[in-house]
Image: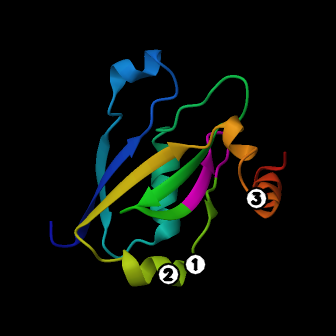
Amino acid sequence: MKNKTSIIVTRESVCLGDDVFSPHESKFSLNKTDNLIQLTDSIIKMNYLSEVQSYRTPWLMLINGEEIAIFNKNSDKAKFLVTEKRFNESFKGVDLLKVHFNRIEQSYFSMISTNFKNLLSVLFNN
């Protein structure tokens, strides 16, 4: 598929029962000309991310190990940590993207900087 980029998506488990279904891998492809918004919209439409009932679970999206965006299962859009230009320079047109999601746990919020807490609060209207 010369004109396609293969996408492999994985995520962390959210609980012990969820581990049964590990590694939570999904595969799809996009046109090599597709942009970051098209990639994230495709993942949102897949309904791929899980959530914890007690709160809206935020997920950190990494592409080939680089932090790219924050997702919330109930959001219809991702909140980007990189510019479209930065994404295009590094990832657009490649043959394979490895996308991984790390769940941002509530306990994590107590360890991160105030500035990042404020950013997450604004992004997710908490």
47 displayed left or right of 114: left
Amino acid at the residue labelled 3: Ser
Nearest to the observer: residue 3 or residue 95:
95
Outermost residue, front side: 111
Residue identifier under label 1:
83
Q: Quadrant of residue 56?
A: top right
Please state the horizontal and vertical placement of residue 27, each as a whole percent of the image. Answer: 28, 46
Q: In which quarter of the image is residue 51?
A: top right
Please state the horizontal and vertical placement of residue 47, each as a whole percent of the image. Answer: 50, 38
Amino acid at the residue labelled 1: Thr
Outermost residue, left side: 1
Residue range of the region highlighted in magenta in the rendering? 69-76
Residue at screen point 78% across, 61% down: 119
Please state the horizontal and vertical placement of residue 107, each as a whole percent of the image. Answer: 69, 36
Task: From this view, report whether residue 49 is shown above or below residue 29.
Answer: above
Q: How far apart are marks 2 and 3 (CA)?
A: 24 Å
Q: How far apart are marks 3 and 1 (CA)?
A: 22 Å
Nearest to the observer: residue 126 or residue 114:
114
N-terminal of the two: label 3 or label 1? 1
State yes or no: discs 1 and 2 in contact (Cβ < 8 Å): yes
Residue at screen point 84% across, 45% down: 126
Nearest to the observer: residue 96 or residue 113:
113
User: Helix or strand or loop: what does disc 3 sit on?
Assistant: loop
N-terminal of the two: label 2 or label 3? 2
Task: From this view, report whether residue 93 is shown above or below residue 113.
Answer: below
User: Helix or strand or loop: what does disc 2 sit on?
Assistant: helix
Q: Residue 62 carries which label?
A: none
Q: Residue 113 carries which label?
A: 3
In the image, residue 59 lies in the stretch drawn in magenta: no
Which of the image's four quarters has the N terminus? bottom left
Residue identifier under label 2:
86
Q: How is the image coloured?
A: rainbow
